[in-house]
Image (tube, rainbow, N blue to C red):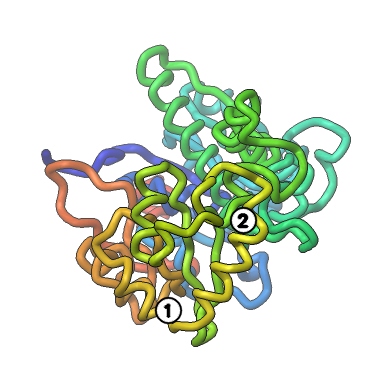
Amino acid sequence: MSGRMLDGVRIVEIEGIGPGPFAGMMLADLGAEVVVVQRPDGPGLPGMPERNLLDRGKRTIALDMKDAGDLSVVRALIARADGLIEGMRPGVMERLGLGPADCHALNPRLIYGRMTGWGQDGPRAPQAGHDLNYVALSGALWYASPPGQPPLSPPTLLGDIGGGALYLVAGMLAGLLRAGRTGQGTVVDAAIVDGSAHMMALLMSMAPTGQLVEARGASMLDGPHFSRSYACSDGGHVTVQCLEAKFYAAFLTLMGLQDDPDFARQHDPSRWPDCTARLAVIFAEKPVAHWAALFAGSDACVAPVLSPFGAAQDAHMAARGVWLQAGGALQPAPAPRFDGQPAPTPAALPGRDAHRAEILAELGMG
């Protein structure tokens, strides 16, 4: 196999923060040519570095879209693109003369990707918000923490990336496939509230069987002693999620609890609190390294909780090259992988406005 999956695909990304740039990075990782139209006065989020990880593999040009000359450059880029990504509040691109109707008049095949939290319509559409707000309203945050504790999810992963960027990428790819067949572009309305609610489908599929109830801490994945994290003596944590009977049996055997009557009734919710308390005491007696060694090579479904820097040193993660040092910083390798293609390597991180001359020359506007 020669060439990357999206070789020849051109994407214009209007500079934003969070899920939009992540989606652009993923498309660039897959081989698309992504040009970021940056603000001339610097990044929109204070404190962002000059070379942003989310810009890896992209080309950059700084343009003022309120300037007629610069706007003509943006239009020229869009006219030759396969897709566009923007993350403005609803109506902003229309006021700039770059809404879907304007862009499809220039390029009927264009896949116009819109990344927002609340969506393009609805009462909250014009309001500000962030990851936690979106997943809170969508229902996706509900089971995130034990009962009695405020729900908290890993920063950005559930909303911005899972419910936002990845759904935008899926929508863009679906649009590109249809445009290839029909020559017709489309608008992708990727809203984090939509995507994060859609991600609940797997969990909600458990409700008819009684394995999911509304009360927090009482369902199969957020209530039992065999599906949670435990603190260890060194301040680290391990995760246990041995759901199936054979994996639960392997866990009990390695813990020396295989003959303990308290743990015999795995699916009896009345036993879960006491079993959780007992396991918490046991795990707190030894450091993470002890438990990692005990469960190594087993099917007990136990794994340590590692930081990204710790994960880079893990034997499995290192063997797959999941975390890499590139450009003087630790960063995740591109994903997913494809048969017949070389191991993924992060591309270079461009500076701001780094490709102005070559982009203008390609457009015949240099």
x and y percentages locating residue 126 in the rendered image: 83, 42
Residue at the extreme bottom: 234
Q: Residue at x 56, y 42 (%)?
A: 267
x and y percentages locating residue 205 in the rendered image: 58, 28
x and y percentages locating residue 348 in the rendered image: 33, 67
State if disc 2 and disc 1 touch (CB < 8 Å).
Answer: no
Q: How busy is the neighbourhood of tag 2: few (under 14 within 10 Å), some, or many (20 plus)?
A: many
Quarter containing the C terminus: bottom left
Name the image quarter holding residue 287.
Answer: bottom left
Q: Residue at x 35, y 81 (%)?
A: 328
Q: Residue at x 27, y 41 (%)?
A: 7
Q: Residue at x 36, y 14 (%)?
A: 181
Report the amino acid beneath label 1.
Val
Q: Tag 2 or tag 1, which sits nearer the N-term?
A: 2
Q: Which residue is disc 2 drawn over?
A: 16
Q: Which residue is disc 1 drawn over?
A: 288
Disc 1 to disc 2, C-alpha distance: 40 Å
Report the amino acid beneath label 2.
Gly
Q: Which mark is residue 97?
A: none
216 relative to 344 in the view: left or right? right
Name the image quarter holding residue 314.
Answer: bottom left
